[in-house]
Amino acid sequence: MQPTAKTVRPPAVAGAFYPADAEKLTRQVDGYLAEAKARPLRPKVLVAPHAGYVYSGPIAASAYKLLEDLSPRPKRVVLLGPAHTVGFHGLALPAVDALHTPLGNVPIDEELEFKALQFPFVLDEARVHAREHSLEVHLPFLQRVLGDFTVLPLCVGHASPEEVAQVLEAVWGGPETLIVVSSDLSHYLPWSEAKALDAGTVQSILAMDVDAMDSELACGAYPLAGVLQVAKKKDLEGTLLDLRNSGDTAGDKGRVVGYAAIAFCEPGEA
């Protein structure tokens, strides 16, 4: 029997979380990047939010701004985010050859995919990714700042920090490889309460406190815990780039979602 041919994953939230028109999308992303603060950091790991762009786009841009002037720029991106639509144990790849956005296709990194699939808890499961937004919304930002790159998109289900860390160690690479963790923070609290809670969560992330990662505090707690475990082992240094919520950008202050942009750099790169 011939193996099943892989395909291109179409975008699930274009026209909802961000513009489906390429020109409008380019203008929006470039506008957020132009407003973000430039910093002389070379990140190995970025933490950035995944809501609709009108809410979290400015905060995400604070992370991706760091990549604009890097030389050389990363050519591989390991992208990890929570699974919102399908419950499962482990980590899941999308069983496709590329991910499509209105800005074009992003090829799956076949070498990193092969390494990840050596672990029995890493699945090749298209249905996990089919309607998931947590990874997709990062791609247009990456396309604008990196140009050509390959991606290893990992939806993280109920996985232990050790399982996530094992995969990361296998695909960590050097300066050619960037790790991106997709996570929002608190959900649907009043503005002042969310602000205080999120500040504490960010301090836990910067302290690389794996045990403090909780899905009530950050929806990307599972991928975050694994990344922090590796970051701590490798003596990475964390920097808070931006911390706001939807009440600060485009939403009602009575019920907000929190967003942070954080960079972790290898020693000497911060």
Image (spheres, rainbow, N blue to C red):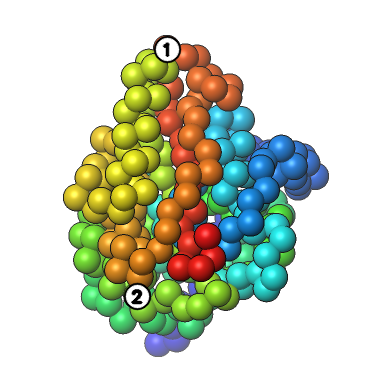
Instruction: Give the label on residue 240, or none.
Output: none
Image quadrant holding the N terminus, namely bottom left
Determine the residue positioned at 22% across, 66% down.
162
- Check disc 1 and give the amino acid type: Gly
Determine the residue positioned at 47% across, 14% down.
253
* 143 left or right of 108 in image: right
Secondary structure type for disc 1? loop
Vertical position of residue 24 compared to residue 120: above or below: above
Q: Residue 181, can we see it?
A: no
Secondary structure type for disc 2? helix
User: Quick one: label 2 or label 1, which is nearer the N terminus?
Assistant: 2
Instruction: Give the label on residue 169, or none.
Output: 2
Whole-percent x, y for residue 218 in the image: 33, 40
Q: Quadrant of residue 88?
A: bottom left
Q: Label 2: how many residues lie within 10 Å, few (<14), some (14-19) or many (20+)?
A: few
The residue that label 1 is drawn on is: 254
- Check disc 2 and give the amino acid type: Glu
